[in-house]
Amino acid sequence: MSGAARLSRVVLEEDAGANLPPLIEADRAQAVADLATANRFAPLAVKRADNAEGPYALHLAIRDGRLLFDIRHDDDVPLAAIGLALGPFRSLIKDYQMLVDSHITAVQEGRMERVQAIDMGRRGLHNEGAELMRQRLDGKIDIDFETARRLFTLLCVLHQRVSAR
């Protein structure tokens, strides 16, 4: 993939307001930082259009039960919008929240061996979420596994912010 098939930045549209646990905010910050460092993101619908080469700015939002990928030029000129139904992700999002809650409890209780086990479970859950993200975006956006993992993390954060309102 060319250097243009990447994200220059990611914006979470529901950034305002919700007071979420520090672990979720840390996951968001790490996912955004990791995406800034390395990613592969090639929207298949826009790469054929004139003057639609990346890098891209991605605005993510949850609207009407869908994850909305608002893909823009690096200068914020809109290029395409892709929506994914949240239904297939719901059980993974629910499991993610349960693990976050368990992690918080284990830290409060000082059970570090439990924290390590929960972290292993979170990694496995992120891998499942990444595979599902890649499947759902197949034919729409070409992404690598690590980019999919980070996008799944951001989906979970967005879902928590929407739920907390």
Image (tube, helix red, strand yellow):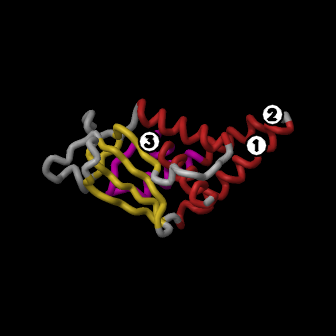
Place of residue 6 in the rendered image (x, y in percent of width and height, measured from the top left): 32, 39
Question: Mark on residue 113?
Answer: 2
> Which quadrant would the C terminus be assigned to in this image?
bottom right
Is the residue marked by circle 1 packed among few (<14), some (14-19), or many (20+) residues within 10 Å?
some
Task: Tell me which segment is drawn in magenta.
Answer: 126-149
| Of the pair 57 and 124, the residue shown nearer to us | 57
Q: Residue at x 49, y 43 (%)?
A: 150
The kind of residue tagged 3 is: Thr
Magenta region includes residue 127: yes
Cβ atoms under marks 2 and 3 closer than 8 Å: no
Cβ atoms under marks 1 and 2 closer than 8 Å: no
The kind of residue tagged 1 is: Ile
The kind of residue tagged 2 is: Glu
Q: Earlier in the sequence, mark 2 or mark 3?
A: 2
Q: Nearer the viewer, mark 1 or mark 3?
A: 1
Magenta region includes residue 106: no
